[in-house]
Structure formats: C-alpha cells, structure tokens
Image (cartoon, rainbow, N blue to C red):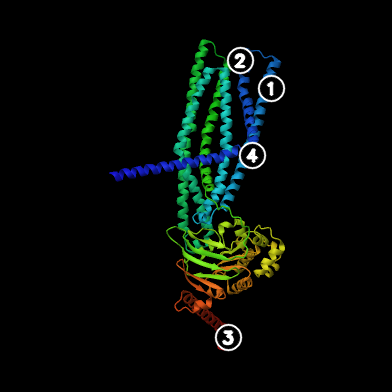
Amino acid sequence: MSSSVEKNNSAENSAKNSETAQQEKDNGSLRLLLSYVFADKKLFIKTLLLVVVATAFDVAGPMLSKVFIDDFIMQDQYPLWPVAGIVSLFIVSVILATLLKYQQNLRFLDIALNAVLDIRKRVYHHVLTLPMSFFDFARTGQLVSRITNDTESIKDIYVQFLSSVLTNFIMLAGILIAMAILDVQLMVIALVLIPTVIGLIYLYQKFSLKQVTESRQLRSDINGTLSESISGMAVIQATNQQQHKLDQFDRINDGYYSTRLKAVTMSSLLLRPAINLLSILILAALVWFFGLKVVEGVAEIGVLYAYLNYLGRFTEPLVEITQKFSLYQQAIVAGNRVYELLQEPSVQDGQGTLSRIESGELSLQHIRFGYQADKPVLADIDVTIPAGHFFAVVGHTGSGKSTLLNLLLNFYQPQSGSVKIDGHALSDYSQDALHQGIGFIPQEPFILASTIFDNIDMGRGLNQQAVEEAARQAHLHEVIAEMEDGYQTHLGEGGLRLSTGQRQQLIIARALAGSPKVLLLDEATANVDSETEQVVQRALHQLQGKVTMIVVAHRLSTIRNADSILVLSKGVLAEQGSHQQLMTIEGGRYRSMYELQQQEQKVAQAEQASDVMASAELSSPAGS
C-alpha cells in the first residue's frame, strides 16, 4: 500500500516538475520574443502612433454616416456646403486610414525582419560555440530546422499576431469609445463578447498546445530524416533500404499530418464559428433593445446604422484575434525550441590569459575519460610528449585513439587528470590560442564549396604567400599551379574537383597554414592510395622536429620512424616505445599487429602479381 502511495506521489511530483519546466520554458521564450518588440523603442512608438491615428480615422466613418443620415436624409434637407463637408471628411478619413494602415504594416514587418535576422544570427553563433558533446546526439536536420524553420515561424508573431492583436485591440477600444458616445447602454451589450472571447482563447490554448508542440517536433523529424537520407543515399541504395526509409518517412509524415489536422480542427471548432454565433446573438439583442427605443420614440435611425456598422467591425477584430492565436501558439512553440537551444551551455573562453602556445610540449597526466561517466574509454593515461617530437598512437578499433585526440583538441574535458601544453592546463589558454596553436587533420576531409584559397585560409586573413607556402609543404602547389584558375579554382561541394588524395593534401595545407606548434592527425592516410600516402609521408617527414606531431595510424608502416609509439588497448596504455623497441617484445600487441599487416601486404602483392601474369597470358597471341 505504501509503495503504491509512493509511486503516485512520485508520478505527481514528476508531472509537476514537467509542468514547471514547461512554464519556465514558455516564460523564457516569451521574454526572448518580447525583447525584440522593444529593441527599437522609437520604431515601436512610431508604429503604435500610426495604429492609433489610423484607428481614429477608421472609426470616424460610421460617426460621419450617422450625422449624414440623421441631419440630412431624415430631415430631407441637403445644404451644399455642409453635405460637401461631411462627404469630403468621409473620403479623406477612408484614404488616410488606408495609407496609415499600409505604413503601420511596413513598420511591423520591419520589427519582424530585424527580430528574425538577429535571432537567426544569435542561434547560429551559439551553435558554433556548442561543445562537441552536444553534436554527439544532435541530428543535423533538426538543428537546421531550428535555425531556419523555427526562426521563420517566429516572424509570424510580429508580422501577423502582434500587428493583428495590437491593431485590433486599439480598434476595439476606438469602437467602444464611439459606441459610448452614441449610446452607453448599447455599448454594454457589445461588451459581453470580450470575456467570452477570452474564455475561448483559453480553451483553445489548453487543448491545442500538445498538438502544436508535437507537429513542430515531427516537422523537425521530417527534416532530420531527409537530411540523413540524402547524405547517406549511396549506402541506402547499396543496401537496398529505399523501402525501409520510405516507410519511416511515411510514418513521420502521417504523424505530422494527423497532429496538424487535430490543431486545425480545434481552431475551426472553437474560434470563428463560436464567435459568429455570439455575434448573431448580440445582434438580436441589439435589434430588440433598439426596437424598444423606437416604441418609446427616442431612437435615431443614424444611431442604429452606426451601431450595426460598429458591431460588424467589433466582431471582426475578435474573430481575427482568435484566428491569429493559432499562429501565436505555433510561434511560442517555435520560440521554445529556439530558446531551448540557446540555453545549451556553450564552450566558454574562460579566464585563460595565455595568448599563444610557445613550444608545444604535451603532457597527459593520469587521464580518465568516458563519453558516459560509468563507461570509461580512457583509463589512467600518463604520457609526456616533448616539443618537436613525433608520437604515434595505434590500437584496435575502439581502443580510444581518436578520443585521445579529442581531449588534446579540448573538445571534451577529462573526468580526472589533466591535459597540459608547455606545462599549462588547457584552461589557461584562450580559445584562439588553442585553435591557432593546434592543427588538426581528420580522416574525412571537410571541404568548403568555395575556392582553394578559401579552403586553405579558412577566414584567417592569410596572404597569398602564406597560402602558397602551406600548399608547398603539403606538396600540392604544383597541382594547383596547373589549374586554369590556380588558387581561385572553385572546388564544388565536397571538393569534387579534387581527387581523394588531393583533398587530404588540401586539409594538410589548411592545418599547416596556421603555423601550429602541435599537429594532430587522425588516420590521415587511411583512405588514400599508396602514391598519395608517400606524398603525405614526405610532408610529415619534413615537419619532424619543427612541430609536435601526434599521429593516429592504422597502417603501421607509416609510423616506423616515430620517436615513440603509444599502443592502446581497451583504453589503457598497453605498450610504449620506438618501432625497434616494440618489435623486440615477444607476443607484444604492436609486434603482432605489425607482422599481421606485413603478411596481408605480401598476400596482396602476390595476388596482384598473379593477376598481372594472367592478364598478360590472355593478351598474348594464341599459340605463341
């Protein structure tokens, strides 16, 4: 019994915490959105004044019509100048109201576009500063959706919702004032609509929030699935997964359709039909009340006309406000998603005062790290790498090689122990110092859809000489010089105009262009041919003694001349030494891996020679 009570209490507390968290998110999102309304106070005040003046001219129309009916038509008298004056005022009020509304719409659009521009910049800047651990779980398509679709939806809160609500509320206030001038009792009848509409909006918000939130999430899932499918199309087609991916997309798309349909149904049921029904009831009450006044002989036909006109105008703003509330709901949900992303902790530059890496000595002191706290990937790694030395890191898949580089790049922080450069903790350096002082060459080259120059420079403001020198160090300058546009050659998406090996050389040139003190290579020659591998090896050999190099290698033949080789096994430093030292260890891990690769290479060479001989026999003349 007590266990059941505890479970119920736990469930209630969980629900309350979830509700509180959602409320905090809503409030934070609303503060974010409202901050841009008042970002340019002068613009907002000008817009507000335009709305008030436009409303005054708009409301003046029925009042002028009332005067014309009661003073001229009912009296059957049409003096020229008074009639001309009333008609002129009516025409001028309509024209000015139209022009002022146009101007106010432009101002609201200005507010909206400035807000979206700033929010999108802010979100993208924040994404660029997020730690690598965030991207371990984030889907590319969903992030793109937040930066593009969600920020675009936020625009609706300014262009459509804010402008509509503000102008319509001021219009309602103007109409109520005009009604009160004509007849206070009739105005009271119209006031009944306002609390009723507020109640309908509350009900709509309560019942539609879930559907709107789900639809935004499903829309992100659609973008994520599309992005994932397009980027992995070769694998999908090679493994015959087209139908599976199509079924997955259909499920998400159907879910999006279902939630959107529920939200639209809720809007159609609670908003306009209910307001229209109330309007009819109010109109009936107004006609009945006015009929009593006719019987009493105190009614004026002009007043009735003005009231009917105002009532039509009174209900329309209420209908529009309720309809626009669905846009508000969507914008708030989009704002929540943007606000949630902005709340993700970014990589802080910290209090680091060191502006440059001097020599590049690396020290890993009893490092322990895991992507999940209870599952260590590296355990008690203790290594010192002197400046200018060439260290290699080898091991089987999953041994922690790339993770070690991630710690050196400050992408992650160890759970215990410390990483130091020149005797200083990484936190003692500014982010700029680390980025400039550490060069990184990944296994998969990232190429901008831009020129060769831009891909080497990467926005660092390097001059032509520095870029060319980096290309020479990577043995790529001669290849570039033969191209028609040289360093201004556009490479296309993914560097399609370069071979696989040339793309890797380009990445090496990019890393060297910053004159780093430390150079990290993550299996940089794993996907290149033997000729390109030799070119890369020559480039690295020329760098020995000039920079501190840490090379994660799969082909052990490429790191035979390393000053020291670290052999990782299941996150532990199993062996360390030069190639010659490690080869003397009987049954050692490194020796076993090296001998196995040598055997595989001999088998491959024998098969290649056999294929060449077979091809030669087939091509020789018959019977020779």
Measure the C-alpha gap from mark 2 to mark 4: 44 Å
Q: Is residue 210 visible?
A: no
- Which numbered disc covers residue 110? 4
Q: Secondary structure at mark 2?
A: helix
Q: Nearer the viewer, residue 180 or 441?
A: 441
Measure the C-alpha gap from mark 2 to mark 1: 18 Å
Residue drawn at x 65%, y 32% as measured from the top left: 46
Return the residue at label 1.
Answer: 88
Residue drawn at x 57%, y 37% as measured from the top left: 160
The answer to the question of whether label 2 and label 1 lie on touching residues, with beta carbons closer than 8 A, is no
Return the residue at label 2.
Answer: 70
- Which numbered disc covers residue 621? 3
For marks 2 and 3, the one nearer the N-term is 2
Measure the C-alpha gap from mark 3 to mark 1: 107 Å
The answer to the question of whether label 2 and label 3 lie on touching residues, with beta carbons closer than 8 A, is no
For marks 4 and 3, the one nearer the N-term is 4
Q: Picture coordinates of residue 245 (x, y %)?
A: 47, 56
Q: Secondary structure at mark 1?
A: helix
For marks 2 and 1, the one nearer the N-term is 2
Residue with the most extreme left position: 1
Measure the C-alpha gap from mark 1 to mark 4: 33 Å
Left or right of residue 503: residue 233: left
- In the rendered structure, which amino acid carries the disc numbered 4? Asp
Where 306 falls versus 248 (above or below)? Answer: above
